[in-house]
Image (cartoon, rainbow, N blue to C red):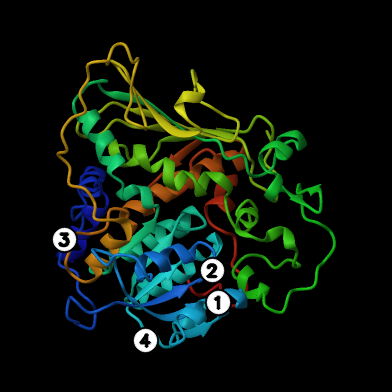
Amino acid sequence: MKKRSRIRQRRMTRREFVSGALATAGAIAGAPALLRGRNLNDKLDIAFIACGGRALTSISELTMTPGRGADGHPDENVVVLCDTNQLAVDAASQRFPQAKTFNDLRRVFDKPDAFDAVVVSTAEHTHAFATYLALTHGKHVYCEKPLTYNIWEARLIRETAARYPKLSTQMGNQGHASPARRTIKEILMTGAIGPVREVHVWADRAWGLQDAASAEKFDHPHGFYNGIQIVDRFKEEMPIPPTNHFDLWVGPAPARPFHETYFPGPRWYRWWDFGNGTMSDLGSHDNDVPYTVLDIRQPLTIEAVSPNVPVAHKELAPATMMVIYEFPGSASGDPPVKLVWHQGDSKPPGWVPEWGGRSQLFIGDKGMLLGNGKLLPEEKFKDFQTPPETLPRSPGHWVEWVNYAKGRGPVPGSNFQYSGWTTEANHLGNVSYRTGKKIEWDYKNLRARNAPEAAPFIKRPEYRKGWQNILKV
């Protein structure tokens, strides 16, 4: 019991994780090791659950490519390839003919002794299933962002991972390991702009439901099907291509007829049954900047609005949305922080094109700091010198994960204790939008105090038959 208490205390201390993330230092104590007790120089045997699309980046980062220098680059073994798209499996098998192949992620774990680690790059709505099975089978896990499809799943994965502190876990928001995160923190540590009370984060991607003129301008490649804007399900049922295991792809989500409007990736992630739009996608990258460099914890209130889709569509996420989070002051004396997320057409007050289409603005008592490291107003800070590097730099996002799995490095910065709570916070933006209310959040009990109607957006009411008994509290 004493050991369990110690783990709980660490995973609930935000300052410890901010420090650990920036310094790539251990937020969870204890030396990790391969469960089979292998030599530290041995290669990981990795199962790739999804092996096309985004998964190709992870495969490239975790294996050697001919012509690439070997210095510091992981070169692990690919022993399992799984994808619901048979074309992706066949293409990956050409590179890794020795790997076992699957279409059903559940079957990968029928013989778990065949691998040490799992990389999850499926569609968002099945992230938690592959990740949970990996953790409970004692496997190191790298999961693409967002960590889970909803808030309840994020809490489950976070709590589950806490039971296995020797497992290496990492969410795929690669910028978390970037030198820029450390530089921003180092500038803020100088006190140049004073205490930060407000942060604006914006991403100008306008994918999702919007008016026809905006869709034509910002989303033509993905927002239309045969020249018709995608604003709801198409009524016709299309034949399923023989290489597409659509029923397995739908997985735990409610069954629906096949249609090409769900593929490729930029299309499926805007459908509520499968994803959560730009908020959970780019929010995992861009909100991560203030989450990392400021001592902010779980939000107290969340309010979301969309000017061109003011009432949430039952099927599709909005392209443009603004979310206002109110975070409490920290135990260390930092003031309360208002974090404002902007996507699509929404921009922070005073925005000019020079600030960029995707960035952050930290507003302090004495000035402002852009995400590119520029202090504002420029005239006031013209003589400011960028401080020397005092925070250790990361060896690389995938390298962190591999090193901890092999027992030769600190816990990865975006481990599931950290990325679990940031995923919860991001999803709350969509929960507020879908309820049409400013939410008062009860973090401990995982509920909106003033909006019981938020419950089905916090946790999926039910999982489809065959998937309903996998995720267990």
Q: Amino acid at mark 3?
A: Ala
Quarter that holds the N terminus: bottom left
Q: In the image, residue 331 lies at what x, y percent? A: 22, 34
Which amino acid lies under the numbered mark 4 shown in the image of this protein?
Ala
Q: Nearer the viewer, mark 3 or mark 2?
A: 2
Q: Is residue 380 above or below residue 319?
A: above
Residue 112 lies, in percent from the top left, at 38, 84
Nearest-to-viewer mark from 4 and 3: 4
| First in sequence: mark 1 vs mark 4 | 1
Q: Amino acid at mark 1?
A: Ala
Instruction: Give the CA separation, mark 2 to mark 1.
Output: 8 Å
Residue occupied by mark 3: 29
Residue annotated with mark 4: 114
Could you tell which of marks 1 and 3 lies nearer the N-terminus? 3
Q: Quick one: SS at disc 4?
A: helix
Spatial separation of the CA atoms under disc 2 and disc 4: 21 Å
Which sits in the foreground, 178 or 30?
178
Q: Earlier in the sequence, mark 4 or mark 3?
A: 3
Q: Which picture quadrant has residue 291?
A: top left
Q: Look at the numbered discs 1 and 3 and tell me whether their residues touch, using CB distance below 8 Å.
A: no
The residue tagged with tag 1: helix, strand or loop? helix
> Would you say residue 472 is visible in this rendering?
no
**Element assignment for label 2:** loop
**Residue 438 percent location from the top left of the image:** 53, 33
Residue 31 in the image: state x and y as whole percent. 15, 67
**381 left or right of 326?**
left
Please name the residue that numbered disc 1 is placed on. Answer: 91
Q: CA distance from mark 4 to mark 3?
A: 28 Å
Identify the residue under disc 2.
Answer: 52
Determine contact: label 4, label 3, CB under 8 Å.
Answer: no
